[in-house]
Amino acid sequence: MDTDRQALTALFQAESEEGLAAMEAGLLALESTPDAGEALDAVFRAAHTLKGNAGSLGFAALVDMAHVLEDLLDRVRGRHVPVTPALCTLLLECVDALRTLLPAAIAGKHDLVPEHRRLMRWMAEAAAGTADEAAGAGRRAQGSAPRAVAPDRRTLRVDVDRLDQMLNLVGEIAVSRGRLERALHAQGSGPAREAQEELDRLSADLQELVMRVRLVPLGPVFRQLDRTVRDVAAARGKIARLVIAAEDVEADTGLIGPLRNALTHLVRNAVDHGIELPERRRELGKEAHGNIRLAARHDAGSLVVELSDDGAGLPRARLLERARAQGLVGEGARLTDEEIDELIFQPGLSTSEEVTEVSGRGVGMDVVRHSVDGLRGSIRVDSREGWGTTVTIRLPLTIAIVQGFAVRVGEETFVIPLDAVLECDELRPGTAVQAPGGGVLDLRGEAVPYLRLRHHFEVGGPAPERESVVIVRDARLRAGLAVDALLGQSEAVVKPLNGPLRRVTGLAGATVRGDGQVALILDVPALLREATLRHAAGACA
Amino acid sequence: MSVTATGGAMARPGQYLTFLVAGEEYGIAILRVREIVECGAVTRVPGTPPFIRGVVNVRGTVLPVVDLAAKLALGETAITKWTSVVVVEVEWEGARTTLGLMTEAVSRVFDLGAADVEPVPSFGVPVKLEYLLGMGRAEPKFVLILDIDRVLSPEELMALPGEPSAMRRAGGGPTSPAPSRGVSTPADPLRGGLEEGAVPRGERVAAPAEETR
């Protein structure tokens, strides 16, 4: 719980700093135009929010100070107290006082120092209209002890768009770095080559730094779901507790929005469909309250987010029944448990008997998959009936630059994200089972399916005599991709495919190659999923 | 059945950029045009409908390119030295998106006065009536004013699920022209009106608020 509290106070601090800045701006506006009602309202709102938040965290000194401020603002708003430069100064001093009280409160110090008490008295007097303008100014002149300066946090808020631009530029530099290296490589060693090597090292450092700047801690983001859990549980007569294990895990700011979107749906589902009612849980010998665990960790260049609950698990029989009724699964088709679990991602499929306010319309999981696909991630669900469900989302750590492995098929170039590549080899037809569009190859005794990209993407022209195969993997399986030629490894700046291309399956984006041509980046999990589906469809037909 | 089929929406007065699609001159409001670029190498994208020619690199941004002739069911545009990509901005699922329109050639910019717009007759035009916002009077003949919001809407451009995913243009490289029916390559595509309102390729015709990122 300690880390939770920390996350909450960090959030409070950030919000309050913003609030104080808004108050300051509002007061300055008020000073220049004394009848600026909107400015006054903005200051009032910020003060009120600050007071409320501070109260919920038990920061008494902040609450007291904000309370007096609110009283005075209320009098000003009611036109009982005129807006004068002296009043604005007083109010600004109060903002300064709040600014010093904020870090003190977070550090656990909740006492008001005498000068704060004096300030509060002045404000109370001003509110009562008993403050004598001249006397007030005089008192302040002697009373204004050197202001405790808030510790300089040396932070800066930056528009994410600007970071995107920086990242884009850094990415372009990475590409031209590659070009320069190739050009100089031919010349052998020399001063130009040395300079290039140093430039290379420096720009790699810069690239990493720019990426780091974009990282956001996941803890506070997850913490916001606490509310969702509580609200949904309360609405459904359930008790649920969210445990967060994200420690210091950070992720690119670009991932946060879609990830939060996906997790909101998943958490709602977990409470609404997963967790049983308290009586039912007792009957089953479980604790009355449901446990939902949200964990994040880094694993091999990916961010893994796991949401597990100890609820009822997926009702496989009902899932299958629904899917059959909706024609998503053929009558005779036999599905494994994993394949049945996968059905929850089908658009329009919902197992709940009733459409509740929170879920059951069958759109949630579809949205989740879209969010995850949009981040070039993968999602899988594991469920044990009666024991709970775990949803695992795996996302690439940064969505902007990938280490890519370029391959050639006909005259097209495709880039495979390197984190999906296991190894490359020559495709020896004599040792592989051949099928249209692919086959099964013998990888040191293991039967590994392979897909011929030329066939899958319907690239025209004859296949070369010798083909190569790239062994890739996703969360579930290993597979080969047969290509004409291997072009090698390079950094690829991922450019999104927009508009009509946003939903093309099997592609994660595009990248501009050294020669200015656009190459498509493969989305390996989606590609393998599509290959499985196509095969299933072909086998059924 | 009324004579006009544009459902009331008519082209507004203003400056229009015209270009050739399957030999006919079409116009769009210049405010929607970001820039005009030479049609470089187009990379095909598997799993898209035939009228999506692929993607191009415009100074580091990857743009989808719609072949207008194919979209309007007038055949496929053959790539020549005149072929231009008109970069336009459209609203897509709430976000502003830039798309490239592959056209046979860019021809001119003209001023469309309020009195210069004629309703689209119910037949005689080479494309579906709902794609047009009117007939613009521009010497020496009418220009067909395209409703690009309609032509480039998600419903019009998204491949329907279950449609075969393929790179249909079999054989050849990324830029290989594969002309089919209806393609006409004008001998002099810039004929008429270029002296006055010529649009040099590769230059901005409008000054949008933000840079292409």
Image (cartoon, grey):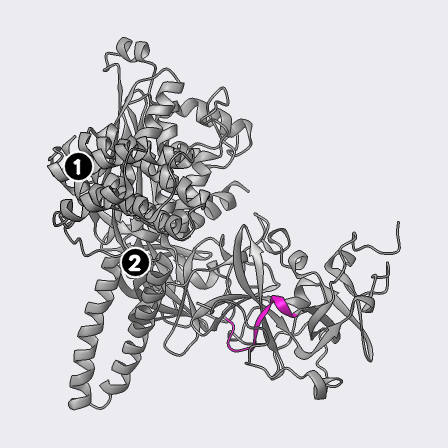
In which image quadrant can residue A400 be found? bottom left
Spatial CA distance of label 1 from label 2 is 73 Å
| Residue B36 among magenta residues | yes
Q: x%, y% of residue B177?
A: 60, 76
Q: Which residue is mark 1?
A: A118
Badge 1: few (under 14), some or many (20 or more) residues near its Cα, within 10 Å? Answer: some
Residue stretch in magenta:
B30-42
Instruction: Return the residue nearer the eye: A279 or B117.
Output: B117
Q: Say which element carries label 1.
A: helix
Which residue is found at the position 35% from the left and 31% from the top?
A267
- Chain to which the residue tagged by mark 2 belongs: A
- The image quadrant where one finds the N terminus of chain A is top left
The residue carrying mark 2 is: A471
* A408 or B41, nearer to the observer: B41
Which image quarter: residue A495? bottom left
From the image, state whether disc 1 or disc 2 is nearer to you. Answer: 1
> In the image, is residue A404 part of the stretch drawn in magenta?
no
Regarding residue A307, the answer to whether it shows in the image is no
Residue toward you, A13 or A349: A13
Q: Amino acid at mark 1?
A: Arg
Chain containing mark 1: A
Name the amino acid type tagged 2: Ile
Q: Quick check: A231 above or below A255? A: above
Residue A347 lies, in percent from the top left, at 50, 37
Residue plotted at (86% across, 58% down):
B122
